[in-house]
Amino acid sequence: MLSAVGPPVTVRVPAKINLHLAVGDTRPDGYHDLVTVFQALNLFDEVSVVTAHAGRPTGERLATIGQGAPGVELLGDLTDEERDAVPVDSSNLAWQAAVALAEAVGREPDVRIGLRKAIPVAGGMAGGSADAAGALLALASLWRLDLGREALMEIAATVGSDVAFALHGGTALGTGRGESLVPVLSRHTFHWVVALQDHGLSTPTVFGELDRLRQGADAEGPLRRIGSVEPVLEAIASGEARSLALLLGNDLQAAAVSLDPGLRRTLRAGVSAGALAGVVSGSGPTCVFLCTDGPSAVRVAAELAGAGVCRTVRVAHGPVPGARVIDGDPTRPPRGPGGPPAGDPGPNMYA
Ligand SMILES: C[C@](O)(CO)[C@H](O)COP(=O)(O)OP(=O)(O)OC[C@H]1O[C@@H](n2ccc(N)nc2=O)[C@H](O)[C@@H]1O
Ligand SMILES: Nc1ncnc2c1ncn2[C@@H]1O[C@H](COP(=O)(O)OP(=O)(O)OP(=O)(O)O)[C@@H](O)[C@H]1O
C-alpha cells in the first residue's frame, strides 16, 4: 500500500446524462454552443487524494503505483480493458484538474490520486470529467483552500466542458460549451435504465461526425434538430415521466448512431422492454431509458440485459447531488460509528 503523508480525502462524484442536448454550429474556437439539460445520476466514481512523497513525476509517464510519488492510480477490481481505457499519465483528467488547481493557488501538485471508477469510460456520462471535478473538490479540502464552489467551477471549466456540472450536480441547464450552468427545478425522482456498451466513442469524433452529417444533409434537406428546451424544463418541473419521455432529445444521437449503427437496436430494444423512451447520453455510446418508476426500471433492465444489445445495464435514478467529500475532510470529523455508507469502497487505500 502507498505510504503517504497525512490522511487521504475521498470525494464521491456522480455521472451525468443529457435529457436535452441541442448542438449549435461550430464556433471559431472549434467548440459548439450547446443548450443542454444535465441530470446527475446515482452512478459514482470515487476520487481519493493524499499528499505524495516529495519528488516530481518523471517526465510524461508519472510514477507507477506504490512509489508514492505524485501521480494517478486506478483502484478496485477493473478488467484489463477498463484499465487500458483510462490513462494514468499526465493526460488523466483528474491529474489535469490537480495541475490546474495547483497553478491557480501557486503550489505544486504533490499529490497521489486514486480513482475508483464505476462510471463507464468514454460512455457519454462524463466519467473523466467527474474524476476531474472530484479531484478539484478533494484537493480544495486536502489543501484547506478557502475557495467557494463558484471559484472551483471556474477552474473546472478550464479542464473540460462537463466538469463544472459534475461539481454542480442535480439538474441544470447548460449553455456555452456546457460549462455555464443554471439550476433547474426538479423535485421529483426520475428512474432510468442505463445501457453500457463494451466500447467507447470519442467525443470530438462524434461532434465532427455531426458537422459532417449537417454539411452533407444540406444537399438532401437539413438534418433535423431537436426543439426548444422550455417544454423539457416544464416537464421536469411537473415530475411527469410520460411528459418528459416525449421530449428527450440529443442532436449528437444521429452522429453517434452513424458511427455506431448498433445503437439503433439498443434504442429500440429499450422501448420494446417497456421503457417510456430512450436517448443516447452525451456523445454516447451509452443509451439511457426513462421508465415510469423504480419497479418498472428493474423490469426493463432485466429484459434489456438479455436482449444482446449492450454489454450490461444499470438501474439508476436522478437527480442526485454533485461531487461530495465522503471521507477525510480535515475540517470535519470522520464518518460516524454507524459504519461507512452503502457502496463504500472498502478499506482506505492508503491505510
Ligand atoms: C457531449 C457532452 O458530454 C455533453 O454534455 C459535452 O459537450 C462534452 O464535454 P467534454 O467531454 O468535457 O468535452 P471537452 O473535453 O470540453 O471537449 C472535447 C472535444 O469535444 C468537442 N466539443 C466539446 C464540447 C462542446 N461544447 N463542443 C465541442 O465541439 C470538441 O471537439 C472538444 O475538443
Ligand atoms: N479519469 C478518467 N476517467 C476516464 N477517462 C479518462 C480519464 N482521464 C482521461 N480519460 C480519457 O478521456 C476519454 C473520455 O473519457 P470520459 O469517460 O470523460 O468520456 P465521456 O464519458 O464520453 O465524456 P463526455 O460525456 O464528457 O463526452 C477517455 O477515452 C479516456 O481515454
Image (cartoon, rainbow, N blue to C red):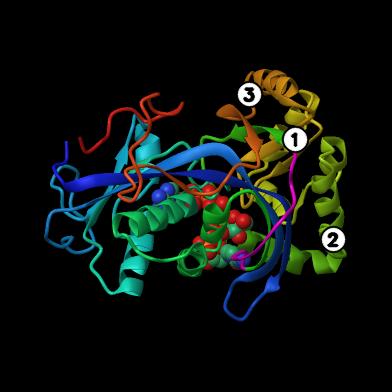
Q: Is residue 106 left or right of residue 125?
A: left
Circle 3 sits on which residue? Answer: 308
| Residue 73, percent from left and from top | 28, 45
Q: Is residue 91 visible?
A: no
**Nearer-N-terminus badge (2/3):** 2
Q: Which of marks 2 and 3 is in front?
A: 2
On whether ligand 2 comes within 8 Å of the CB at mark 3, the answer is no
| Residue under the point 36% across and 32% down | 78
Task: Name the residue type under label 3.
Answer: Gly
Q: Residue furthest bottom?
A: 28
Q: Which of marks 1 and 3 is in front?
A: 1
Question: How many numbered marks appear?
Answer: 3
Mark 2 → mark 1, Cα distance in angstroms? 20 Å
| Residue under the point 23% across and 44% down | 7
| Residue under the point 71% across and 18% down | 299
Query: Which stretch appears magenta?
Result: 177-188
Instruction: Using the image as rendered, state which of residue 296 and residue 227 is in the foreground.
Output: 296
Which part of the image, by quadrant, shows the C terminus? top left
Q: Is residue 328 visible?
A: yes
Q: Residues within 10 Å of mark 2 (few under 14, many from 20)?
A: few
Mark 2 → mark 3, Cα distance in angstroms? 34 Å
Task: Name the residue type under label 2.
Answer: Ser
Task: Indicate the secondary structure of the residue bearing disc 1.
Answer: strand
Mark 1 → mark 3, Cα distance in angstroms? 19 Å
| Residue 111, percent from left and from top | 24, 55
Q: How crowded is mark 3: few (under 14 residues within 10 Å), some or many (20 or more)?
A: few
Marks 1 and 2: in contact by CB < 8 Å?
A: no
